[in-house]
Image (cartoon, coloured by chain):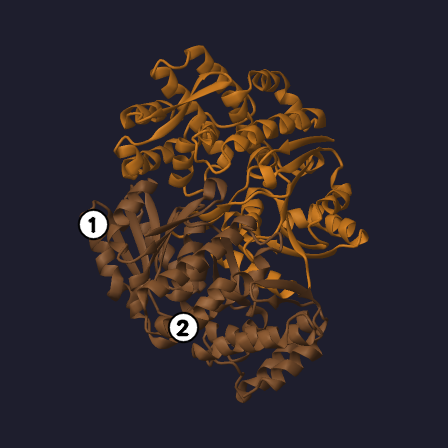
Chain colours: A brown, B orange
Amino acid sequence: MKILKVCLGSRSYNILIGRRILRDIDKYIKGLNIGIDAFVIANRTTNRLFGYSLARILKNSGFSVRTEEVPDNEKSKSQEVALRLISRITKYDVKKRLFIIALGGGVVGDLAGFIASIYKRGIPYIQVPTTLLAQVDSAIGGKTAIDLEGGKNLVGAFYQPRLVLSDIDFLSTLNKRQLISGLAEVIKYAVIKDPKLFRHLEKQYLKILKLNKDSLEYIVYNCSKIKARIVEQDEKETKGLRTILNFGHTIGHAIEAAAGYKTYTHGEAIAIGMIAASRISCKLNILDGSIVSKIEDLISRVGLPTRIDKLNLSGVLEAFYHDKKFIHGRNRLVLPKRIGQVIIYEDVPIKLIKEVLINSAA
Amino acid sequence: MKILKVCLGSRSYNILIGRRILRDIDKYIKGLNIGIDAFVIANRTTNRLFGYSLARILKNSGFSVRTEEVPDNEKSKSQEVALRLISRITKYDVKKRLFIIALGGGVVGDLAGFIASIYKRGIPYIQVPTTLLAQVDSAIGGKTAIDLEGGKNLVGAFYQPRLVLSDIDFLSTLNKRQLISGLAEVIKYAVIKDPKLFRHLEKQYLKILKLNKDSLEYIVYNCSKIKARIVEQDEKETKGLRTILNFGHTIGHAIEAAAGYKTYTHGEAIAIGMIAASRISCKLNILDGSIVSKIEDLISRVGLPTRIDKLNLSGVLEAFYHDKKFIHGRNRLVLPKRIGQVIIYEDVPIKLIKEVLINSAA
C-alpha cells in the first residue's frame, strides 16, 4: 500500500492506495479518532458490491453503521436527496459521534462531502472512491457540491475529507465505458504535468484496458500525487494554480451541457475538449502540431471519442453563442505548451474555438 | 470609529464600531477588493430603515445593488427561504463579482452568512448588524446556519465575514424589548470575562436603557473584543474555549424550546438560564451567594425576567426529562466562579437543575 499525504495544515489527510485495503479500513478510521458511528452513503451498485463488506468490517470492529443508498446518477446531487439524507442522519444521530463515508464515484463523493460540510457546521467524512475518475480526481481536494436548477455544482463547499481510501480492486468492477472515461482524466494529468506518465500510457494502455492491477495502481498513485500537490498550493482555487486541472474542461463542459448530459460521459466530453484545446493551442503557435497528433492518438487508442458528433455540434455552437464568457471573449482556456506543461490563455477568440470544433466534427 | 481586528490568518477581518459609519461603507468595501456587485439580504424593517440609504450610498459609489427582503422572524432561517434567495442570486449573477451584505439581526446574519458559504463554494459577505444582540454576538465569529425540521441551526458552516460594520446609530431604532434582550448577552460577556464591564453595567444601565450612544458604543466595543479574542483562539469550537460563550444558554435553549420560541426572546431565556446556572454554581460551592445576588440584581434592573413563568415550568421540566443530554447526566454547564471567570462543569445532576428551576419559578 502506498500513502500520499495531502499537506493542508490542520486539514491534512492521507490518501491510501493499494490492493485489498478496504479490509483494514476499520484500523485506519480508528487512527483518526473521529468517532465510532459511521453513516455510509452509497449507490445501489456500490452498496451491493462493497457496502455490505464495509459494514461488516466496521461492525466487527465495534463501529455502529447505517447505510443509505442514493440513485446511481447525477440526479442524486440534488437538494431533495441532500435534505432527505440529512433528515436520516438527524434521526440516527442520537448520542453519536458521527462521521460520513462516501462509497462510490464522483456523484456520491460530491454529495456526501457537501452534507458532511454543512451538517452541524461540519462533521468528519471519508472518501472511498470506487471509480477510476473518483480515485484519480474527484475524491481528492475537498471540492464538494450539489446541483440546483440554476446550475451544476451551484452550491457546495471546499471541505477536505479526513482520509481517502483508493482500493485498486474496486476498479475490476467497472464496465469498459466507466474505465475509459476515467482514463480521460488520467491523460489530462499526463498532459498538464507528467511526460513520464504520458509515455507510460502510450506503452501500457492495453494492459490498463485489461485491468492490470500494477498499471492501475501506478496511474492512480501518480495522478493522486499530482492532484495532491496542486491542491496543497491552491486549496480554494483562489490563486489560479488549480485552474490547470481544467484542461479540456471548459469546452468539455459546454459539450456535456449541450448534449443534455446524455450523449457523452464527463470523460468523453473532456477528451473532445482536450483535443480541441490542443488544436487551438497549435493554431495559436503555442503547441507543435506533432504533439497534437500524439495527444489525439493516445485519446483515440484508449477508446475515447476524438470528434464531436455532428448531431451535437450545432447545440454546442449554440451554447457557445449564449455563453457570455465566450461571446465577450472573457474565457480562459488551459492550453498545452508541451507534454507536461500547460499555460492559461485568456480571451481565445470564439471564432477560433468554433472553427476547431467544426473541423473536428465527425 | 473604533477598529477591532479578528486575527484568523487568511480569514482575518475588521470589526468597525462607531456612530454614523454606514455612510462610508462604500469606502470600506472598496478597500476589501471583493467586487462591485452587492446582493443585500434584509428584512422589511431593516430595509426600510437602512436598506434604501445603503443601496444609495453604494450605487453613488459605482456599485450595482440588488436587495431581497425576508420575513422578520426565525422562519426566514429555512431551506425554502435559502433556496429562494440562491435562485435570485443566480439570476442576478451574470458577469458579476458578487458579494453579500447581511443587513439585520441574528436571523438575517445567520441566513445570509450560510448562503454566502455555499453559493459557488463560498463568496465574500459582510455583516451589517442592526440589533444589539447581533452587534455584540451573532455577527462576529462566522457561525452561520439555517433551521431544518430536525432542529435549529441543523445545517450551517463556520464561514467568516470579510467585514463587520456595527453602526451604533442603528440601535436607536430598536424597541425596548429588543434592546433589553440584547443586554442579556452583554451581561453574559461581563460575567464570563469582564468585571469592569459588569461594574459599568451596574452603574450605567439607566443611561443604556435611554440609548445613550457613548454607553452603547462602550458595551458594543468591549463585548465585540471579548468575542473576537475567544473566536481567534477557537474558531471552529473544537478546543472547548468557545464553550464559555454558552453561559446561560444550555438551560436558556431548553426554556426557549419548551415555550415554543414564543413566550421568551432569546435574551430573556438566557437571562433566566444565567440565573439558574449561577444558583447551581452556588449550590455546588463554586460561586459565592452574594455574587448570585449581584448577577440577579443586574439582570432584574435592566428589565430582564429572573424567574420562569409557572405556566412554562412544567414544559421545561418535561423537556429536561426527554433530553438525553440531561437524563444521562451528560450535560456541560458553564458556571460562574466569580464575576469575570467561569468554569465548564460536566454532569450536573438533573435533580439539582430541576430544584433550582422550581425554586425560581414565578
Is the residue A25 above or below the residue A248 in the image? above
The residue furthest left is A60
Image check: B65 left or right of A152? Answer: right
Image check: A327 left or right of A217? Answer: right
Is residue A305 among what the camera can see?
yes
Amino acid on which the number 2 mark rests in the picture: Tyr
Task: Residue A309: give x, y in percent of width and height.
Answer: 52, 86
Image check: B22 left or right of B248? Answer: right
Is residue A257 among what the camera can see?
no
* Mark toward the viewer: 2 or 1: 2
How many C-alpha atoms fall within 10 Å of the one at disc 2: few (<14), some, or many (≥20)? Answer: some
Q: How far apart are marks 2 and 1 (CA)?
A: 39 Å
Is the residue B91 above or below the residue A101 in the image? below
Q: Which residue is drawn at 42% across and 36% down?
A: B253
Q: Which residue is drawn at 74% across and 33% down?
A: B19
Q: Which of A70 and B145 is in front in this view?
A: A70
Is the residue B324 above or below the residue B101 in the image? above
Identify residue for label 1.
A59
Residue A205 is labelled as 2
Image marks 2 and 1: residues in contact by CB distance under 8 Å: no
Pointer 2 or 1: first along the chain: 1
- The quadrant of the picture occupied by the N terminus of chain B is top right
Q: Mark 1 lies on which chain?
A: A
Amino acid on which the number 1 mark rests in the picture: Lys
